Amino acid sequence: MSDFRALDGNQAVAEAMRQINPDVVAAYPITPQTEAVQVFSQFVADGEVDTEFVTVESEHSAMSACVGAGAAGARVMTCTSSAGLALMWEITYIAASMRLPMVMMVANRALSGPINIHCDHADSMGTRDNGWIQIYSENPQEAYDNMIQAVRIAEHADVTLPVMVMQDGFITSHSVERVEVFDDAAVSGFVGPYAANFQLLGASRPLTFGALDFYDYYFEHKRQQVEAFSHATEAVLEVAADFNCRFGRDYGLFQAYRLDDAEVAVVVLSSTAGTAKVVVDDLRAQGIRAGLLKPRVFRPFPAAEIVRALSHVKAIAVMDRSTSFGSMMGAGPLFLETAAAFHVLGRAPQIPMVGYVFGLGGRDISPPDLEGVYHDLLAVADSGDVGDPVRYLGVRG
Amino acid sequence: MPEPKGWKELPIGGIIDSPGSARDLETGAWRARRPIVDKDKCTSCLQCWMFCPDMAVVVQADKMRGFDLYHCKGCGICAKICPADAIAMVAEAEAGTEGEGG
Ligand code: SF4
Ligand code: SF4
């Protein structure tokens, strides 16, 4: 039987980790993720899990310990944020290229400087090319559900890649909401036992891990990683279908909210999508056909599926809670990816598309801000004129 | 070296699943200076064999027999360690066929 509890995003993630009962967790505290591993370490201390909890002196060491444990054949999890993820950087590439299916929660936080502890997506977006699957969560429930599904996605035989599960720092990680916590046995039944394909400690089959790889083999190994991502989309859907069957919540590559007959649509990740749903409902009540597309999986980027889901709208806003300095017109990564998808896969003439960068360093985004975006879109749809294609929303002039 | 495998055949993750495959790699191709042993000076103490990082010192029946030039990288550790000063490091261009064939 499920239990309904009041949990913030970090506590919900710690609950999921308790139920998954990983072999090894190696983690270092950093705001706003700290609470997740702190709560989990209490489960370890209380003997509620069998996990070997490795306290380390830095995130570089945390990820290194995860890599070592993963290579040994353990089911591995960790959590981090911001500068912690930045310090892991080198080793995140190694985890991915060694094809170690670990799961890491990232409570999104701005990257210095100036130093800032609040939410934006600079940390995880900066790692979008490191070879990890990326799943974004809107609220504590999704963070909990995504952690559980991430284990199966990472370990899927056609995938074997590490997975990052994001939630918005503070906004989600520290906001208490109603969270459905499944039965322990149901979760462990869903994730199942883990049997690594390759094990460093399997004496019957000697293997070498982390060998030098030059121009003779490196390219082939990178090509294999690309291939794994091409299977990941299917694996995400397969795991989501089983999750829905057992737990009754429907997940996909993205969530389409009142999008079927929408005239104007916003594409936005994570908690802001929750705010946008309220705005969509308000606008609908006024007779405005507003819709929303909330990507769940950013890596692999579901380009064809997103283009298909938005092909009928008259104008699109893609909203980024991070920027890419020096990119085309200072656009954010989600806009760039979506615009590229429409250029390659979309119909002609192109649907007018506007990029918004918002919420950097935790700058609040309110329903009136989002209403403004929808009204901008209505004007763009009317005139066919995009005007300024990349806009900074909520920054003082 | 066998024909290199394509990405569809290779084990994933850069894993090497056939132990001892380093034997196939001709590390000797990097060598700039070649160790040449003076068999009259050599006492077969086997210190060179112990210290060689590439297991490139050939020993048969407890006797130092020369070098495996397919794997010897020419690092010179053997020459440095030899208590009898029996190993000379000779530039490859000048070494000719000396020391080849063990
Ligand atoms: S260290 Fe010198 S003396 Fe000893 S075995 Fe090697 S070559 Fe001979
Ligand atoms: S030169 Fe270096 S690699 Fe070659 S035999 Fe001597 S110690 Fe070994």
Image: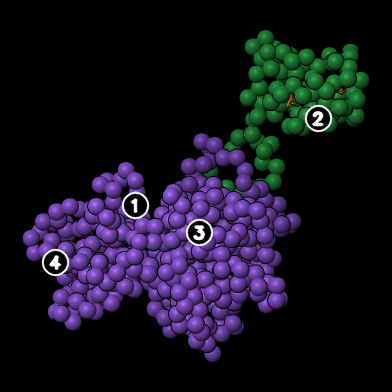
Chain colours: A purple, B green
| Front in this rendered view, residue A15 or A303 | A15
| Residue at numbered disc 3 | A81
| Residue at numbered disc 2 | B51
Instruction: In the rendered structure, find residue A378 and report the number of the disc placed on it.
Output: 4
Q: Which badge, 1 or 3, comes first in the chain's sequence?
A: 3
Q: Secondary structure at mark 4?
A: helix
| Residue at numbered disc 1 | A323
Give above or below for B4 relative to A318.
above
Residue at x 92%, y 20% (from the top left corner) = B43
Indicate the position of residue A329 as horizontal and vertical percent values.
25, 47
Q: Secondary structure at mark 3?
A: loop
Give above or below for A315 relative to B14.
below
Quarter of the rendered structure image containing ligand 2: top right
Indicate the position of residue A342 as horizontal and vertical percent values.
24, 56
Q: Which badge, 4 or 3, comes first in the chain's sequence?
A: 3
Q: Marks 4 and 1, Cα distance to the nearest angstrom?
A: 25 Å
User: Label 1 is placed on what type of residue?
Assistant: Thr
Residue at x 51%, y 84% (from the top left corner) = A5
B31 with respect to B68 (left or right): left
Indicate the position of residue A21 as horizontal and vertical percent values.
63, 73
User: Label 2 is placed on what type of residue?
Assistant: Phe
Residue contact between numbered discs 1 and 3, judged by CB atoms under 8 Å: no
Q: Secondary structure at mark 2?
A: helix
User: Label 3 is placed on what type of residue?
Assistant: Ser
| Front in this rendered view, residue B56 or A128 | A128
Q: Marks 2 and 4, Cα distance to the nearest angstrom?
A: 77 Å
Q: Secondary structure at mark 1?
A: loop
10 Å neighbourhood of mark 1: few (<14), some, or many (≥20)? Answer: many
| Residue positioned most to the top | B94
Which chain does tag 1 point to? A
